[in-house]
Every structure is written in C-alpha cells, then in structure tokens.
Image (cartoon, rainbow, N blue to C red):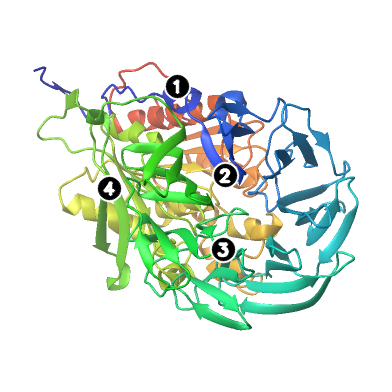
C-alpha cells in the first residue's frame, strides 16, 4: 500500500483541475415533458456559455434541438428563467442575442415570432384554444425609463395583446385545463417575490381578454410560489403564511391547507418558472421539500393529504416535472454531480438521463460535507456546511493546520447546498478547507430565519461568517492566521464588509461584489432596484446607513489583500462598483489584483473565464498564505507586493 506523501496544505496536486471543471462540465437547467419526449436546457461553457435545448425521445435517443448560434436564454429580470416551452414537438424559446421569441419544429431552423424591438419574453405557456402564447413581457423600448412588465397574449405571427398591466412584476401565468381561467402572480416594489406576492385568477373571455379577476391569496407579507391547476380544474399553490412554504389548494372559493410542516416546499424566485412539485395524476402530486438543508422527494395524495416519502440517494432536488407514472427532476448529492434523473413511480427505478460531467473521481479525493451549527451574535444559531481537506495521495505535517476559505453565497436570499461541487472540491483536494455558510437571511430555514437580514444586511451575514470561521479556529480545525473569505454578488458584498469592518480574515476574493450601496441603489436593474429598502432601509431617507455600510467609504480600515473579478457587461452589479474599490486599494498600497472579463455579465459562463478565475484565486492565496503550487497555472498581477 502506497503511503500518502507528506506535504503542506494548499500544495497538494489534485485530479480536479480547471480543465475538468470547465471543458467537461455543463450546467443543467430547465426541464419540460412533451408526450413521451423529455427536454432540458444545457449551459455549455465550452461553447462560449451558449445554452441549448436537448431532447430525449421515446426511443431514448438524445439530440440537440437548438442549432448554433442560437442561445436559449431570456433576460427578463436579468436573471431570466423559463426561457423555453414545448407543445406537440414544437419548441418555443427566447434567443439571448436579440431577445426575440422563436418557434422551432424538430430538425428545422428556428423562425422568429416577435419583432426585433427591445422587448423581452419569458415564462410562456400555450393557449391551445386560441392558438396563442401567454407569457411575461418586459418592455425596454424607451431609454432612461424603468422597463414595463406585463402579461401578454402573443399570436404566432407576432401580434401582441396585453392581458394584465399596472403592477411592477408578473410571473407564473397558468391556464386551467379547459382554457377558461388564468392564474398568475404579481408583486410590487419594494418587495421581492419571497417577501410578498399576490395570486390572482381571471376568466379568459371569448376574445382572449381577461375578465372577473380576483385576488385569491398573498399580500405584502405573504409569499406565494408556483400556482398550478390540477386536471380537475383545482388551483394549487405554495404559501409561507405560517412561516414555512407549504402546499395549499383553492377550491369552491376557499383555501385549504394540504400540508402543515416546518419544511420549505418553495424556493426564492430568482428565476422564473421554478418548480418544486408537479401533478402525476389528478389526485397525486410529486413534490420536493427541504429540512435542515437536505431536500427530499415525496408523493402527496391530494384526497387524503397523506405525504409519502420517495427514497432517493439525492440531497438536492429541483425542477420537478411529472406525467403519468414517472417524474423527471434535477438532482445531486455529496457524491453525485448534478444530473437530469427520471424516476419510474411503479418500479421506483431511477435512471440518469444526463450528467453535468461524466468524469469519475476516486472518492478518496472527495471531501464529504459536514453540516454544522454554531452560536453567532446575540446568542442565535447559524448554519453552515464544512468541507475538510481531502486527498488520498497526501497528508499534512502533524503540526500544521489547513487554510480556510469561508464561502458567502449570493442572493443574499439563497442557500448553500451539500451537493457535490467541483468548484469546492477544487480547494479541498489541494488541502484548503471550505466553510459554506447559510447565514441569517438564507432560505431553507423558514421565513423568520430569512427575515433576520431585514435591515441588517452587512451585519448579520458578516457576523455569521466571522463566527463560523472563529468556531473552526477554536475547535483547532483550521489555521487562524490563514483565513480567507470569498463570495459573488451579494456574497461579494458580505466578503468586502467582512474584510473592511472586521479583522478576522487575512485575505479575500470578491466576485462582482457590491462595494457602494448608494451606487447600487441608484444604478441597478429593475428587479432589484428596491431590494435594499428591506435589507438596508429607505433611500435616500436613510442615506447615512447606506454610507455607513458601504466598504468603499472605509478603505482606511482594510488591512489585508483582496482579489477582484468582474464581468464588464454586468447590469446587476455594474463594473464601476469593483473598479472604485480596486482604485482605492491601489492608492492605499494594499496588495490587490483585478481580473476583468470582456463579454461576461453577472456570473461567468465562458469556460476560459471560469478557468482563469479559479486559477487566479488559487495563485493569489498561494502568494498571500505562502504555500507552493505543484501545478503550472497562469499567474496574476498582484499590485503593491514584492512577489
């Protein structure tokens, strides 16, 4: 038996390379079922971040539907979601370059439906009776004006008829089986959809217009998620009116609770068309829910309201779609990468239809997640997932403790997941520990935990990251002198706040992070333009708080090295946020690196840029924390240093 080599943490050679992560990994997205065929979208970094629709036919043949250069992606709300749907083997999709809707029959070229104007479309369904598309429209035709969102009915020749207007946001248009009624969600500034939404229903009249509209559920402090009609014409939805996203039914003018559990059946609607349940038949729902960070699959009898677990090896389940006898979903686990999975409900047999990466990694290189709870500020409990260093080829000197990277997720209304992520294993297999923090404000732990961040962004999230790192240091698990924090978007803001206002971390990496809250309040896209009112306070009335919590105003307190990554076409966190921070650190003489990317928006999609950012962050830490690299990677310029 070969004994592991003794080498310092951070210097271990790993088979989990950036080439493996980028060139061989795809992002699995939206799922749709059309008859016997299954469709899904694939984000392909190796094709310049292009997203294509893929079809698996009844005879198990898998083929691309979307020809190059088409890119199936909508920019409604900037984050998009639900960018295609399928009806009778015809795919309708939004193309990223021009944001037009296209119609494509199998093995034919896509044909444009909508005109070439600055209007975006998403979350579409097909109105069979009227042979029209009902979807969310976002009008950007007038410069320097907030885009106008509406629900519209589109003819297949491109004519547009408004159905509902006047609210700031619309989502989830859903037709009853007989085509006579339409359900949809609305919300208005300053709410985000997880704060408060309204569920409406209206009658579709003979001319295709809406009449007799009424609000069914929801409000300013009640979040409604995913309305769906059963084949019997009963309307189902998820509400957090009890503090937890649970399932409800609207029938005969009354709302009935189907499930009352301290579990989350819903998710924060950052993307349109998210799905956590689907009808297998009139009286059977297949659903997924999370408790303590783990997602479960279950079958719900809508007559008896009995919830029956459906055992799977997965801990992360999403994108539920179902038809008679089977269910298809995205799934992953601590040892399984994300995959499109089909479950035969009669035999309980699972079949993997597509994996995000087909590579097989020896489990000896994989760090298994360890959920932890710890006390944070004010005696409250916070949650995180810890990944210790793991590489079967190496062990560290007995007297050495590993460096730690604390991950602060984005959103901030998102959640860390225990699913296998090569982006985390990239670090742990090199001897660097990772703590993925579900700070106060994260979803998955009920509305009360989510609302801990109200008015406290930049405080509660930072506390939970700092206390998590200190907890591991106090337990003797990691090196207190080699603590780093890394995050993207809102997580980048948490990162910069932790580095500016606290002295726990010795280095940091900000991916398109917020540094100036005032600038963000004045210069961001519509979807999040009022988000800060709940997280920080009203602007400009509470301008002083915005200034006090903006790292850009307190660079004199920064005393450690930082590396910044930024997409130059980012409309969510504009590049000037990062550039101002870099300039300030350059002037102060702190070690600083800046890696901008042409052609990238909010989050990186191109293989070469994902590769460069990971390697640059590793190179940065190796120089700051003083460990030797055993692989050749491209260096990055670190200003104000001698190395």
Image location (x, y in percent) of residue 611: 48, 26
Q: Residue under label 3, please give it.
A: 547
256 up-or-down from 477: above or below: below
Which circle's residue, 1 or 4, is located before the other in the chain? 1
| Quarter of the image that includes the N terminus | top left
Which circle's residue, 4 or 3, is located before the other in the chain? 4
Q: CA distance from mark 4 to mark 3?
A: 33 Å
Q: Nearer the viewer, residue 314 or 479?
A: 314
Question: Which of pointers 2 and 3 indicates the residue nearer the eye?
Answer: 2
Mark 1 and mark 4 in contact? Answer it, CB < 8 Å: no
Say how many tags the image has.
Answer: 4
Q: CA distance from mark 1 to mark 3?
A: 41 Å
Which circle's residue, 2 or 3, is located before the other in the chain? 2
| SS of the residue under disc 4 | strand
Question: Image quarter for residue 506?
Answer: top left
Which circle's residue, 1 or 2, is located before the other in the chain? 1
Mark 4 and mark 3 in contact? Answer it, CB < 8 Å: no
User: What numbered label is drawn on residue 31?
Assistant: 2
| SS of the residue under disc 1 | helix
Q: Does residue 459 appear anywhere in the picture?
A: no
User: Is residue 75 found left or right of 440 in the rendered image?
Assistant: right
Q: CA distance from mark 2 to mark 3?
A: 43 Å
Q: CA distance from mark 2 to mark 4?
A: 31 Å
Q: Residues within 10 Å of mark 4 (few under 14, many from 20)?
A: many
User: Is residue 163 found left or right of 187 in the rendered image?
Assistant: right
User: What numbered label is drawn on residue 386?
Assistant: 4
């Amino acid at each position: 038996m070969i004994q592991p080599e003794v080498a310092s943490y951070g210097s271990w050679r790993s088979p989990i390379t950036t080439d493996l992560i980028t060139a061989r990994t795809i992002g699995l997205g939206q799922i749709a079922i059309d008859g016997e065929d299954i469709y899904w979208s694939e984000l392909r970094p190796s094709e310049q971040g292009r997203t294509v629709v893929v079809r698996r036919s009844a005879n198990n043949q898998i083929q691309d539907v979307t020809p190059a250069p088409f890119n199936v992606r909508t920019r409604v709300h900037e984050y998009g979601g639900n960018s295609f749907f399928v009806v009778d083997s015809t795919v309708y999709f939004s193309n990223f370059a021009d944001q037009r809707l296209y119609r494509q029959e199998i093995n034919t070229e896509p044909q444009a439906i909508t005109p070439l104007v600055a209007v975006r479309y998403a979350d579409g369904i097909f109105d069979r009776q009227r042979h029209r598309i009902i979807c969310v429209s976002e009008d950007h035709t007038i410069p320097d004006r907030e885009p106008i969102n509406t629900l519209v009915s589109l003819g297949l020749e491109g004519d547009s008829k408004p159905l509902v207007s006047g609210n700031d946001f619309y989502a989830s248009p859903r037709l009853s089986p007989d085509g006579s009624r339409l359900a949809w969600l609305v919300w208005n500034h300053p709410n985000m959809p997880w704060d408060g939404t309204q569920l409406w229903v209206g009658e579709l009249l003979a001319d295709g217009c809406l009449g007799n509209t009424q609000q069914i559920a929801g409000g300013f402090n009640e979040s409604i998620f995913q309305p769906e009609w059963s084949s019997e014409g009963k309307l189902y939805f998820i509400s957090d009116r009890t503090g937890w996203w649970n399932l409800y039914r609207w029938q005969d003018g009354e709302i009935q609770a189907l499930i009352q559990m301290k579990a989350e059946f819903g998710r924060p609607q950052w993307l349109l068309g998210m799905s956590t349940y689907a009808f297998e038949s009139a009286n059977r729902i297949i659903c997924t829910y999370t408790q303590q960070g783990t997602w479960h699959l279950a079958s719900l009898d809508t007559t008896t309201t009995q919830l029956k677990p459906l055992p799977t090896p997965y801990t992360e389940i999403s994108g539920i779609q179902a038809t008679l006898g089977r269910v298809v979903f995205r799934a992953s686990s601590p040892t399984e990468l994300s995959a499109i999975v089909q479950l035969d409900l009669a035999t309980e047999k699972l079949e993997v239809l597509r994996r995000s990466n087909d590579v097989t990694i020896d489990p000896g290189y994989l760090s298994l997640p360890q959920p932890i709870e710890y006390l944070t500020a004010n005696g409250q409990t916070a949650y995180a997932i810890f990944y210790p260093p793991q590489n079967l080829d190496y062990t560290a000197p007995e007297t050495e403790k590993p460096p730690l990277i604390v991950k602060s997720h984005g959103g901030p209304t998102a959640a860390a997941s225990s699913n296998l992520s090569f982006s985390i294993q990239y670090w742990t297999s090199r001897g660097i520990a990772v703590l993925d923090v579900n700070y106060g404000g994260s979803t998955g732990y009920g509305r009360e935990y989510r609302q801990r961040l109200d008015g406290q962004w930049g405080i509660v999230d930072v506390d939970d990251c700092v206390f998590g790192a200190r907890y591991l240091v106090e337990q003797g698990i990691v090196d207190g002198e080699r603590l780093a924090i890394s995050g993207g978007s809102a997580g980048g803001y948490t990162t910069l706040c932790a580095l500016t206002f606290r002295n726990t971390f010795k280095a940091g990496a900000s991916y398109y992070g917020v540094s100036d809250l005032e600038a963000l309040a004045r210069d961001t896209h519509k979807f999040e333009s009022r988000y800060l009112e709940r997280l920080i306070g009203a602007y400009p009335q509470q301008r002083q708080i915005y200034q006090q919590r903006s790292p850009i105003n307190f660079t004199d307190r920064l005393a450690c090295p930082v590396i910044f990554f930024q997409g130059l076409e980012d409309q969510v966190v504009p590049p000037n946020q990062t550039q101002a921070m870099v300039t300030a650190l350059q002037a102060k003489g702190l070690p600083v690196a800046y890696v901008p990317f042409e052609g990238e928006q909010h989050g990186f999609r191109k293989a070469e840029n994902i590769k460069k950012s990971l390697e640059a962050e590793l190179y940065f830490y190796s120089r700051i924390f003083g460990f030797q690299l055993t692989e050749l990677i491209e260096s990055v310029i670190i200003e104000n240093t001698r190395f």
